Image: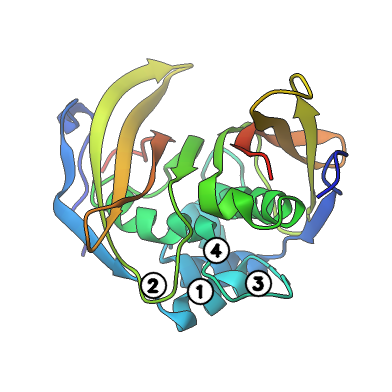
Amino acid sequence: MSGAAPPVLRRVVTQAVIDAYAAASGDHNPIHVDPAFARSGPYGRTIAHGLMTLAFAGQMLNRWSDGRFDAEGEIEVAFVGPVFAGDEVEVFGELQGPADAPGLTLSVGCRVGTRVVLAGTARMPRA
Amino acid sequence: MPTFRAYADVQIGDVCPPTPARFAVTQAIADAFRAATLDDEPNPSAAPSMLAAVYLIQVLQSRGSPPGGVHAKQSVRFHRRLAVGDVLLTSGTVTDKFWRKERPYVVMAFETRDAQGALVASGVTTSIWGAAA
């Protein structure tokens, strides 16, 4: 890991990806997997699981920290917008706080184009 | 057929589920999660920490929210690395409920421990309750 911000991670979400995540996670909430149900909901179509978007953020943090995020990290996020089938999600992070702080703090987010869909903060020990 | 609960029936202090949910981390589950989250990590020896999203679902579903609910916020802290072979026990407690912008929210704190009782993960989930049952 360098002292620089984590490289942006990109993931393309399709309905097949959403369906695969539902199968892997056991979360078959129809707002994610049932287009007919989702049409009558607040978004008018299916949306990706928020925890899947969070998993993308975890991947970025874990790679950047050589696994320290998985071992001792923490993250707090708000799901501020929906991710739809066909969206490309960009995960980004930026170091926060003083360089001599005992741990690392990053602002973390996910966006689709210019639309932010997840925003939060992650922390982990230094190497 | 799942049993759904009305938002009015959710009480602060509710423990979900009544006894901790058991989850065994297997290689197959870890591999399926990696594939489903498009994780092409070249060294997939350990189970991804975000597998929390899977074992947490059991706890979230035990609350009985009707279909259509969505995640609003999530915090999670990992106390140690997850490993294939781990047996996890997760319990949740409703710590708050409130309305905001005409939407019903439920806040639940959770703890996940291993078979020896050591803390593996902890955090807080804030959800918008599903449409009335």
- The residue tagged with tag 2: helix, strand or loop? loop
- The residue tagged with tag 4: helix, strand or loop? loop
Q: How far is mark 3 from mark 4, CA to CA?
A: 21 Å
- The residue tagged with tag 1: helix, strand or loop? helix
Q: Mark on residue B25?
A: 2
Which residue shows up at 56% across the image and 37% down it?
A75
Dot 1 and dot 4 residues touching (CB under 8 Å):
yes
Q: How crowded is mark 2: few (under 14 residues within 10 Å), some or many (20 or more)?
A: some
Give the farthest residue toward the bottom. B28
- Sequence order check: which comes first, mark 1 or mark 4? 1
Q: In which quarter of the image is the C terminus of chain A?
A: top right
Q: How far is mark 1 from mark 4, CA to CA?
A: 7 Å
Please give the residue where the numbered disc 3 appears in the rendered image.
A16
A27 left or right, relative to A1: left
Q: Residue B131: image x %, image y %?
A: 36, 39
Please tell me whether mark 1 or mark 3 is closer to you in this view: 1
Q: How far is mark 1 from mark 3, CA to CA?
A: 19 Å
- The residue tagged with tag 3: helix, strand or loop? helix
Q: Would residue B51 be seen by someone viewing this image from the given angle? A: yes
Q: Considering depth in this image, is A94 or A119 the residue closer to the camera?
A: A94
Give amino acid for label 2.
Val
Q: How far is mark 4 from mark 2, CA to CA?
A: 10 Å
Dot 2 and dot 1 residues touching (CB under 8 Å):
yes
Give amino acid for label 4.
Pro
Please tell me whether mark 2 or mark 3 is closer to you in this view: 2
Which residue shows up at 22% across the image and 60% down it?
B116
Please give the residue where the numbered disc 1 appears in the rendered image.
B30
